[in-house]
Amino acid sequence: THQLNLIIRNAASVTRNTRIFYSNILAIPKFFSTSSQRVCILKKHMGIPHPSSTMWNFNIATVNRVHENLQPLKSCLTEIQSTSNVDQTIAEATGIFKYLNDDNFMFWLEIFHQIFPCVEVIYKQMQSQEISVFQVNEYITDFKNAILKIRNSKYCENPSKTLMAEAKEVCDCICVDIMDRYSSTKHLIAAKLFNKKSFTSF
């Protein structure tokens, strides 16, 4: 998961707008991790069976949870705003609620939510101990095609030409990152073919 989050973090650092989104998305788990009372309110609105302050440790999980539970999360924040007696808590809840209603934030949330499954798939595929050079090429090609499909889809369309260009840039960045990370895999597999200890395997 650490490697997956590195890939996403690199993509999220491409532009100022993605860096802002990345900072805001990470502020959500941080907000809840500092208070068991907030987690209890979160449980009530989101129906979490076993609430934990660490349930949003990973960036990918954070994006997915926010995307899939947007309205319950807003309801949770509204309750915190109206019931808390701590000024800082109210201010933080108000800040998070505000960008959950921000068009730019929602634009990036949707894009990363679409991209993450593709990244997770290729990451899991590359963990196989029995992977071949042919499979590496096939997996990378499938991944590039999946990201290209997102790049050319409605998810990357925006009234702002700047945001639209940045969305495509993020897709390109992730493709390059995956290529760089796994290009050496083919060389390692090829080297294995010439390892005398491996001859009996073929």
Image (cartoon, grey):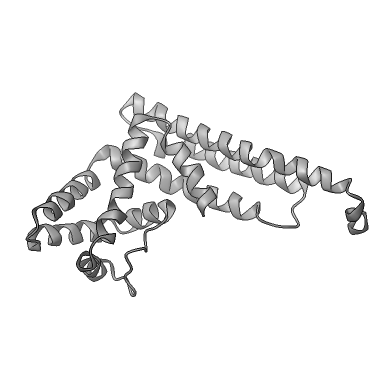
Please name the residue shown 28% across and 49% down the image.
27
Please name the residue shown 31% across and 27% down the image.
160
Q: How many marks?
A: 0
Residue 133: percent from left, percent from top: 77, 45
| Residue 199 in which image quadrant | bottom right
Please name the residue shown 54% across and 52% down the image.
120
Looking at the picture, tell me which residue is in the foreground, 114 or 79.
79
Q: Is residue 108 left or right of residue 40?
A: right
Looking at the picture, tell me which residue is in the foreground, 84 or 122.
84
- Measured along the vertical axis of the image, is residue 175 above or below residue 56? above
Outermost residue toward the bottom?
49
Looking at the picture, tell me which residue is in the foreground, 36 or 76.
36
Residue 26: percent from left, percent from top: 33, 49
Q: Is residue 137 visible?
A: no
Outermost residue toward the top?
161
- Measured along the vertical axis of the image, is residue 86 above or below residue 44? above
Residue 32: percent from left, percent from top: 26, 60
Q: Is residue 76 left or right of residue 195?
A: left
Q: Is residue 141 left or right of residue 177?
A: right
Outermost residue toward the front?
34
Q: Quadrant of the C terminus?
A: bottom right
Looking at the picture, tell me which residue is in the foreground, 96 or 35.
35
Q: Is residue 14 visible?
A: yes
| Residue 43 in which image quadrant | bottom left
| Residue 107 in which image quadrant | top left
